[in-house]
Image (cartoon, rainbow, N blue to C red):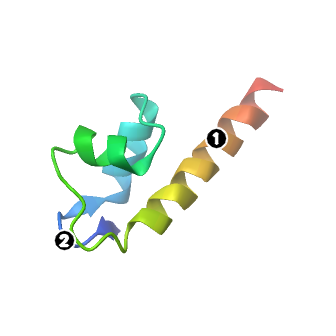
C-alpha cells in the first residue's frame, strides 16, 4: 500500500525506515530520499510510528 503518493513511498518502506531508527515523519522522508510534498501522508506515518512503538512495547513485556 502506498503511504505517500507524491513520492511513491510504500508502507513497507515506512516500516523499514522506522526499524532503522526513524522516529518522526521527517526522518522517514530522509530515509526514503524524499521530501514532503503535500504532507497528506504525515498523519498516516504518525499512525504507523505509533503502531510500531506499541509493538515494541508489548514485545518488551
Of 34 and 59, nearer the camera is 34
Q: CA distance from mark 2 to mark 1?
A: 26 Å
- Residue at screen point 34% across, 40% down: 27
Where does the image place residue 18, in percent across and percent down from the top left?
Answer: 44, 38
Q: In the rendered view, would you say 40 is above or below 21?
A: below
Is the residue marked by circle 2 packed among few (<14), some (14-19), or many (20+) residues within 10 Å?
Answer: some
- Residue at screen point 41% across, 63% down: 42
Where does the image place residue 5, in percent across and percent down from the top left?
Answer: 23, 73
7 left or right, relative to 12: left
Secondary structure at badge 2 equals loop
Dot 2 or dot 1, earlier in sequence = 2
Quarter of the view holding residue 58: top right
Q: Quadrant of the N terminus?
A: bottom left
**Cβ atoms under marks 2 and 1 closer than 8 Å:** no
Quarter of the view holding residue 52: top right
Q: In the rendered view, would you say 27 is above or below 5?
A: above
- Residue at screen point 54% across, 49% down: 49
Secondary structure at badge 1 equals helix
- Residue at screen point 43% across, 29% down: 21
For the image, the number of numbered tags is 2
7 left or right, relative to 48: left
Of 48 and 27, nearer the camera is 27
Q: Which residue is mark 1?
A: 53
Q: In the rendered view, would you say 10 is above or below 17?
A: below
Q: Quadrant of the C terminus?
A: top right
Q: In the rendered view, would you say 21 is above or below 3?
A: above
Q: Which residue is mark 2?
A: 6
Of 38 and 7, nearer the camera is 38
**From this viewpoint, which residue is outermost toward the top?**
60
Is the residue marked by circle 1 packed among few (<14), some (14-19), or many (20+) residues within 10 Å?
Answer: some
Residue 61's disc is: none
Where does the image place residue 13, in percent across and percent down from the top left?
Answer: 31, 48
Amino acid at each position: 500500500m502506498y503511504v505517500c503518493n507524491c513520492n511513491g513511498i510504500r508502507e513497507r518502506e515506512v516500516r523499514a525506515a522506522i526499524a532503522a531508527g526513524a522516529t518522526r515523519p521527517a526522518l522517514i522522508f530522509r530515509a526514503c530520499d524524499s521530501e514532503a510534498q503535500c504532507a497528506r501522508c504525515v498523519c498516516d506515518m504518525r499512525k504507523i510510528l505509533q503502531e510500531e512503538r506499541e509493538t515494541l512495547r508489548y514485545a518488551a513485556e
